Structure formats: structure tokens, C-alpha cells
């Protein structure tokens, strides 16, 4: 059964579209379970479950017979979200007869729900003429099959509208998580890792003969490479091992592979895409074979495919053109991918993987680029060059939008520009409530591009300078002098206001290409201060560069990430003091900067008072703190809806931190994304946070909200939400308050969803 399961899933994954996928499912499940009928019913937008594929029922009933939610045996399976196993279906009170199907011949019935992300997509059914209950093995197999196929079916349903017919595509909407607020309308540029057979962007071929010639040249180049490699290793390999190179050459000389690719090029796709499709199909065929030796040949085909693809992609990458309104789309976007696009042309970002608190989303907010994350069902490789709308408010993406939807979003873009103009008057006004309670608004930065935007919007300081960003944009560790120059620019730009520099925070979702960290669970592994304490040479060079850069300005604060214990803080402080003493001996006229702790892990929450007693300031990193408190990976789109910054446990932790820090006479700020949420900012002000630090984009909105309320109102709202049992109720309570206060428009516009 396990082999059958794997084989069916592989076949379905290779299906061209939803129709093919469903037909493969019903045919293969029927064969494997040796039943007389297998059918799939899919749910439509009106909660009706329609027969979409069947092997055994009358073909004429497909697409016509349907049951409402809770109606009939299929509707019962869907509404109860559990299997239904009957030896005689007609005797069940929910049984309904549909003459079109011809199912009166079948007594035994086994139906299981197809569930994806808690949403019932459909029902998978097998039937048999004999009056008998399917055994436990049958039931377990069908349930397992349904669970395995649910994601494939969800993806196929979501991408149904994306296919091109006669070079025309229909409008299709996909849902993810809001990454950075705003709306962008532009042209898709797909960013994919080079030599990834499963991520080659679809592009239309304009000159088939030239593309075919290029394809044959690439094949010739790979043949020459393999021959040369075989000659080089000839003396080190035995005859059996040398046979592998002969097999590769044989595959490249095989007319069938080449002819398949040429045929697809003539149909309109570029060589790289056609090659990836053909190789992918051959890999799937080998992988599905029962013979172990033949199944292992899939790896050889995959390797050969990558070798040819590297030549096919070379010219494409050299001639990459970015439109003026580029929307960058990829499976997992990175900071370096953003850096490849001219900044004046990048208007939107869409990432298949990741969540609203992924590092790239944080960068997007800093750069004021509308972004949607975790669009797991987006067939991104088919979208290159297509028109797209990115709705960073609601986390939705519209491909090939129609004129009506485009007009709606154009109105929002216009309103956004008017709203930003209205904020200009706030720049020089203090951030204080109507009853004169003062709150400091600082910014989170990482790029020099952030500086101008931050100052234009009235930032009073920097609550978080991400020093890892310059490290991520290089192919080696920057030297001490290079770091000094970078830090000096930041310190000078904001002087005399404070700049809080976080020491190198890599690991987790922030990797350096020249310092790879391979871990099964990176967020609970080697990251943040754990790395820099293990590598004091990196830490000392960095804090020396920071302090040297602060000479004559004295507006530096040093902040330590991922502190989980008092010894970690004391060891870090000792290294900073050591570096300071060295610099003083070298003649630098500097002062020892304040040293602070980032509260990001639950251990730091419960030791906040002890840490505050040994620190000059404290700052909450609400992104990681929320992740660790709720045990939710903030980069995992599958659990993105469970990442709730206003969860009662998170709010109670935030309140406790302020209480303990102030008890020791230490100021406390918050630099996570929660501080930039205008609604959440009201709660943070009421809790007593001294500084809210956020992206420059959100600063005017937060200031506008705070200036529109009285502290006593915010405290009343906080008292109400702190006794509520879940995040949904808390969010509804906040929304109700904001609506009554007339400031809902500052949060997000309404669009047709």
C-alpha cells in the first residue's frame, strides 16, 4: 500500500491540470483498492459538492450531479469532516438517489473528506456492489490518500485560471499573508534559483528556430563537458563507474528527449522551460517505478537535466530586463534578490514561502514596497511577464486582472498618495496624546535608503539598526574599517538623536552565503548572541567598529539579540568593555555606550527584572517573542494564521516586561513589527512603553492615531482587552474602538475580496 500511495501521489503531482489529476486519482485508487467505483466530489463557491471525476459511475453525470453541504452521504461526510463506511448505503437515512449516476448498482460505500488547511475541499468515495463494510486497512488507505492529495488538489484548483489559451489568461486571485502594506500594479518578473529544474519561469519563445539552434548548442556543450570529465577521471574510476558517463552521453544522444523539447519549443515556450518540463516528466516516471535500480536512475536524469539547464539559463540571465513597474515573484525571496532589481523599478513583492514576519517582509516594510508572503498555491513559474496586482493590506494577489478590478485598485493607489500627503503636516509635530502624554517614535533601519525616508517622516531616533544587512549584501565578512564606515553614516545621519545598533543577528531565517548554518531547527539553534559569543573575533571587530564610528557623536547604543540568561548578558558586556578599553588605549576619544538587552525569548520575560538590573535599557523584539511564546514558526505559511501578535499570552508578557523594567528604573522600548501597527500601538502606549520603533512607512500612521486619542482612553481599551480569552475577540474589540474613534481609514482600505 505504501508503494502504491507513493506512486499515485507522484503521478498526480505530474498531472498537467486539475482535470488530469482527478482522473488519475479515481483510476489509480480504484485499481489499488480493487473496487468497482472511485469518485471525487469537489466543493464550489456555493458549498455544493459536485461530481468532478469518476471511474465506475456514468460519465455523463460528471459536472452535473451535486449535493449541498450536509445533503446526502457525500454532504454528510463533508459536514462531519470524518469517514463514512457503510455496507448498504441505501439503508442510511441520508442516502439520496441520483438516477444519472447509475450508482443504484453499488451497495458498499466508503467516503472520506479532502481537507486542506482546515477547509473541506471535497470528498473521495469508493463503492462496490457487494454488501460489505470496507475493512480498516481500506479505510486507513483512503484517509491517508486523501490527506496526501489534499494539497495537490488545492493547488490545482487555485491555479485553474492561470493557464493560457490562445495567449489569453483569465483573472485569478490567490491568498497569502500581508507582508508590507500598500497596493502595487505592475509586471511580474520571476526570480528563481539558477539550475532549479522545478522553478524555470515560463516565457514565450519569439523565434522558434533560433531557440532550437540554441538548445542543440547547449546539448553539444554538455556532451563535451561530460567527455572531458570522463577523461579526467578515467584513471581513478573502474569500468562500472565509467559507464555512468557513457549513460549520460547516451541520454543526450537519445532523439526522443531532444525531439520532445523541440516539439514544445515549436508550440511557443523557451528552451529552458521546455527542457525542464520534459526532464521533470522523465524524473517522475523513473521515481514511480517499482524496480529499485530503475528508480535510482531518476537522480541521474535530474543531474543531467541540471547540467543542460545551466547552459540554457545562461543567456536568459544575462539579458534579464526589469520593467519600470517590476513585481518580483519567487518561491522564497531573499535580500540579495531584492538587490538585483533597480530600486526605482521595484514596486511590489510576492513570495510563495514565508510569512508576514519573514526577514524579507521586514525589509520590504523598511523599503515601503507592497508585499504578500506565503502564497503557497501561486504557480509562479507561469507568471513571468504577466500583469499582477499586489494587495499588501489583505494579503492577496490578482493575476491578469480585469478592467473592473484594476479600476478598484487604481482608486486605492490614488487614495494612498493623498493620505501620505496629509501626513506631511505631522512631521515636526510631537507624538503625544490629546492629554499631552509624550511617546517617542523611532525607526528600524538596515539600509542607507531608510535614512532619508525616516528623517522625512519625523523619526526621533533609531530603535533598531540591523547590522546583519550589510553582512548579507556581501560575499565575505566586512572588515572592521568597512563596518566603521557603514556605521558612521548611520550615526551621522541621525545625530544628535540616538542610534541603537543590534550586534550581528544571523541564524534562523537570516543566513550568510559565506557562513552557512545547516540545522534541522534553526530558530531553536545557533543564532544571535549564541554565534557571536562562540566567535568573539567577529563580535569584538563589530563592537570596535561601532564605537570607533561613534567618536565625536556619542549617540550610539549597543543592543544584544537573543539573550536568554544573565551569564550571556554578562559575557557580552565583558567583551564590549574589553573592546572599549582597547580603543581608549589606542587613543580614541569615546564614551562607553549604553548596553541593552533584546527580550525575544520567554526565558528573558521571566528574568526581565534580573536582566534590567544589569542593563542600561531593554527592548522587546515582538516578532521572535510572539513566535516562541506561541510555538509558531513565523516563516511557515502553513501556520501563518496561528501567528497572532495580539494573543492574550503575548500581551500579558509585554505588560510584564514593562512593569519589571520600570521597577529597576530602566527604559523599555519595542522594536518588533507590533510597534508599527497603529491599532496595537495604542495598547503599547497604555502599557507604558517609552519608545515605539518601527519602519518609517508606518511612523506617520502611528503618530496620527496616538495624537487622536487620550491616554485614559487607551488605558480603558487595554483594560478591556486584557481580560479577553483569545486574539480574535481582542482584535474585534480594538476594531470596534477604532471605528468609534473614526480612525479605521488609517489601517487598511476595503477592496473586493
Image (tube, helix red, strand yellow):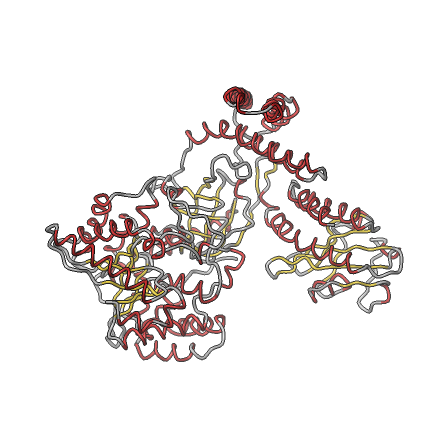
Percent x, y of residue 413: 39, 52
The residue closer to the viewer here, 554 or 374, is: 554
439 to 496, vertically: above or below: below
User: Which quadrant would residue 250 be assigned to in this image?
Assistant: top right
Name the residue located 30 percent from the left edge and 76 percent from the top edge: 710
The residue closer to the viewer here, 341 or 625, is: 625
The residue closer to the viewer here, 158 or 192, is: 192
Horizontal relation, residue 593 to residue 599: left or right = left
Q: Is residue 309 visible?
A: yes
Q: Is residue 266 visible?
A: no
Percent x, y of residue 629: 45, 67
The residue closer to the viewer here, 418 or 198, is: 198
Percent x, y of residue 603: 39, 68
Name the residue located 21 percent from the left edge and 47 percent from the top edge: 484
83 to 32, vertically: above or below: below
Percent x, y of residue 110: 79, 59
Amino acid at each position: 500500500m505504501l508503494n502504491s500511495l507513493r506512486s499515485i501521489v507522484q503521478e498526480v503531482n505530474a498531472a498537467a491540470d486539475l482535470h488530469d489529476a482527478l482522473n488519475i486519482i479515481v483510476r489509480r485508487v480504484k485499481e489499488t483498492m480493487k473496487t468497482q467505483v472511485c469518485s471525487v466530489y469537489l466543493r464550489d463557491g456555493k458549498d455544493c459538492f459536485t461530481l468532478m471525476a469518476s471511474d465506475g459511475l456514468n460519465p455523463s453525470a460528471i459536472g452535473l450531479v451535486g449535493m449541498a453541504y450536509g445533503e446526502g452521504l457525500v454532504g454528510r461526510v463533508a459536514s462531519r469532516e470524518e469517514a463514512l463506511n457503510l455496507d448498504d448505503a441505501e439503508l442510511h437515512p441520508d442516502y439520496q438517489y441520483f438516477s444519472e449516476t447509475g450508482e443504484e448498482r453499488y451497495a458498499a460505500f466508503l467516503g472520506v473528506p479532502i481537507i486542506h488547511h482546515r477547509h473541506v475541499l471535497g470528498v473521495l468515495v469508493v463503492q462496490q456492489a457487494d454488501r460489505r463494510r470496507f475493512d480498516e486497512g481500506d479505510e486507513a488507505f483512503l484517509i491517508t490518500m486523501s490527506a496526501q492529495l489534499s494539497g495537490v488538489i488545492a493547488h490545482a484548483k487555485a491555479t485553474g485560471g492561470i493557464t493560457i489559451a490562445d495567449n489569453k489568461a483569465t483573472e485569478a486571485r490567490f491568498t497569502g499573508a500581508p507582508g508590507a502594506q500598500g497596493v502595487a500594479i505592475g509586471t511580474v518578473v520571476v526570480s528563481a534559483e539558477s539550475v532549479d529544474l522545478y522553478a524555470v519561469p515560463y516565457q514565450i519563445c519569439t523565434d522558434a528556430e533560433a531557440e532550437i539552434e540554441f538548445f542543440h548548442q547547449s546539448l553539444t556543450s554538455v556532451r563535451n563537458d561530460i567527455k572531458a570529465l570522463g577523461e579526467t577521471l578515467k584513471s581513478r574510476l573502474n569500468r562500472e563507474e565509467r559507464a555512468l558517463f557513457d549513460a549520460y552521453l547516451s541520454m543526450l544522444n537519445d532523439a526522443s528527449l531532444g525531439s520532445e523539447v523541440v516539439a514544445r519549443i515549436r508550440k511557443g515556450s523557451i528552451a529552458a522551460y521546455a527542457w525542464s518540463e520534459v526532464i521533470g516528466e522523465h524524473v517522475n516516471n523513473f521515481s514511480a517505478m517499482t524496480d529499485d535500480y530503475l528508480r535510482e536512475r531518476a537522480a541521474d536524469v535530474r543531474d543531467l537535466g541540471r547540467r543542460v539547464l545551466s547552459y540554457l539559463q545562461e543567456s536568459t540571465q544575462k539579458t534579464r530586463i526589469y520593467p519600470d513597474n517590476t513585481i518580483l515573484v519567487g518561491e522564497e525571496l531573499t535580500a540579495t534578490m531584492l538587490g538585483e532589481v533597480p530600486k526605482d523599478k521595484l514596486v511590489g513583492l510576492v513570495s510563495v514561502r514565508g510569512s508576514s514576519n519573514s526577514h524579507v517582509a521586514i525589509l520590504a516594510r523598511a523599503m515601503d514596497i507592497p508585499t504578500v508572503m506565503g502564497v503557497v498555491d501561486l504557480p509562479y513559474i507561469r507568471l513571468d511577464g504577466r500583469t499582477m496586482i499586489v494587495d499588501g493590506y489583505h494579503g492577496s494577489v490578482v493575476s491578469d486582472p480585469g478592467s473592473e478590478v484594476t479600476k478598484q485598485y487604481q482608486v486605492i493607489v490614488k487614495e494612498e498618495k493623498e493620505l501620505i500627503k496629509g501626513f506631511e503636516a505631522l512631521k515636526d509635530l510631537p507624538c503625544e496624546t490629546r492629554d499631552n502624554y509624550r511617546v517617542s517614535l523611532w525607526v528600524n533601519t538596515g539600509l542607507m535608503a531608510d535614512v532619508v525616508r525616516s528623517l522625512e517622516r519625523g523619526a526621533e531616533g533609531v530603535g533598531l539598526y540591523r547590522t546583519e544587512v550589510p553582512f548579507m549584501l556581501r560575499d565575505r565578512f566586512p572588515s572592521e574599517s568597512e563596518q566603521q564606515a557603514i556605521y558612521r553614516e548611520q550615526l551621522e545621519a541621525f545625530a544628535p538623536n540616538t542610534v541603537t545598533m543590534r550586534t550581528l543577528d544571523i541564524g534562523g531565517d537570516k543566513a550568510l552565503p559565506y557562513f552557512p548554518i545547516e540545522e534541522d531547527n534553526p530558530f531553536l539553534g545557533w543564532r544571535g548572541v549564541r554565534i557571536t559569543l562562540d566567535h568573539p573575533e567577529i563580535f569584538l571587530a563589530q563592537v570596535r567598529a561601532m564605537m570607533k564610528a561613534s567618536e565625536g557623536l556619542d549617540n550610539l547604543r549597543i543592543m544584544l539579540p537573543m539573550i536568554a540568561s544573565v551569564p550571556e548578558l554578562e559575557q557580552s558586556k565583558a567583551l564590549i568593555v574589553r573592546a572599549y578599553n582597547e580603543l581608549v588605549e589606542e587613543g580614541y576619544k569615546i564614551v562607553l555606550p549604553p548596553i541593552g538587552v533584546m527580550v525575544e525569548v520567554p526565558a528573558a520575560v521571566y528574568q526581565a527584572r534580573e536582566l534590567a538590573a544589569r542593563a542600561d535599557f531593554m527592548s522587546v523584539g515582538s516578532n521572535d517573542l510572539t513566535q516562541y511564546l506561541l510555538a509558531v514558526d513565523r516563516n511557515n505559511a502553513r501556520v501563518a494564521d496561528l501567528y497572532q501578535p495580539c494573543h492574550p499570552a503575548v500581551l500579558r508578557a509585554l505588560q510584564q516586561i514593562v512593569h519589571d523594567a520600570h521597577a529597576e528604573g530602566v527604559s523599555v522600548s519595542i522594536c518588533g513589527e507590533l510597534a508599527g501597527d497603529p491599532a496595537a500601538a495604542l495598547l503599547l502606549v497604555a502599557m507604558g512603553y517609552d519608545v515605539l520603533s518601527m519602519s518609517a512607512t508606518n511612523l506617520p500612521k502611528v503618530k496620527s492615531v496616538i495624537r487622536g486619542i487620550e491616554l485614559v482612553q487607551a488605558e480603558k481599551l487595554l483594560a478591556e482587552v486584557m481580560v479577553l480569552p483569545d486574539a480574535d475577540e481582542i482584535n474585534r474589540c480594538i476594531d470596534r474602538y477604532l471605528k468609534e474613534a473614526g480612525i479605521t481609514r488609517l489601517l487598511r482600505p476595503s477592496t473586493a475580496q
